[in-house]
Amino acid sequence: MWVITISYFVFRGVLGPIIESFYLAPIFYMAVFSLVIGNFFYVYNYMIGCAKREQWDIIKYAFLVPFYWLMISLAAWKALWQLFFKPHYWEKTVHGFHLENK
């Protein structure tokens, strides 16, 4: 939805009519409003949570939450791809790099 929204406003002259043909105008603008305002309130909610716990120094990281959501989406697409094309593959995490070799 973010890609469609940004594409619509940036390339409105070229992509505007194509995107508008998929959605009725009232539905499209309600969806854009919900996307922007809804995500704002999610980030605001994270900031309020930090403020209530008096963790003032980490409030600035609440603005990185949308990038975290993007990474989760990419991981889900990768997992779906691996489910079909590498069904028995297991990505193992190597632990213990911080330990000395003995």
Image: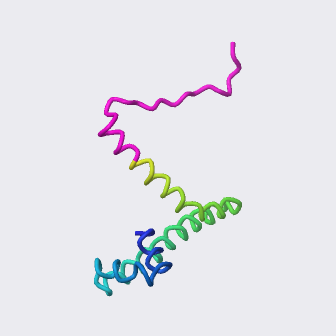
Q: Measuring from the top left, give residue 99's x and y in whole percent.
A: 68, 23
* Nearer the observer, 60 or 64: 64
Compared across the picture, whether 25 is left or right of 102 comes to left
Above or below 99: residue 83:
below
Q: Measuring from the top left, give residue 87's x and y in whole percent.
A: 31, 33
**Residue sitting at 50 percent across and 53 percent down?**
71
Quarter of the image with the C terminus is: top right
Quarter of the image with the N terminus is: bottom left
Above or below 33: residue 42:
above
* Nearer the observer, 95 or 10: 10
The answer to if 1 sits in the magenta stretch is: no
Q: Measuring from the top left, give residue 8's x and y in whole percent.
A: 43, 78
Compared across the picture, whether 94 is left or right of 33 comes to right
> What is the image's colouring?
rainbow
Above or below 82: residue 39:
below
* Nearer the observer, 2 or 98: 2
- The region drawn magenta spans 78-102
Prevailing secondary structure of the magenta residues: loop
Which residue appears farthest toward the bottom when viewing the image? 26
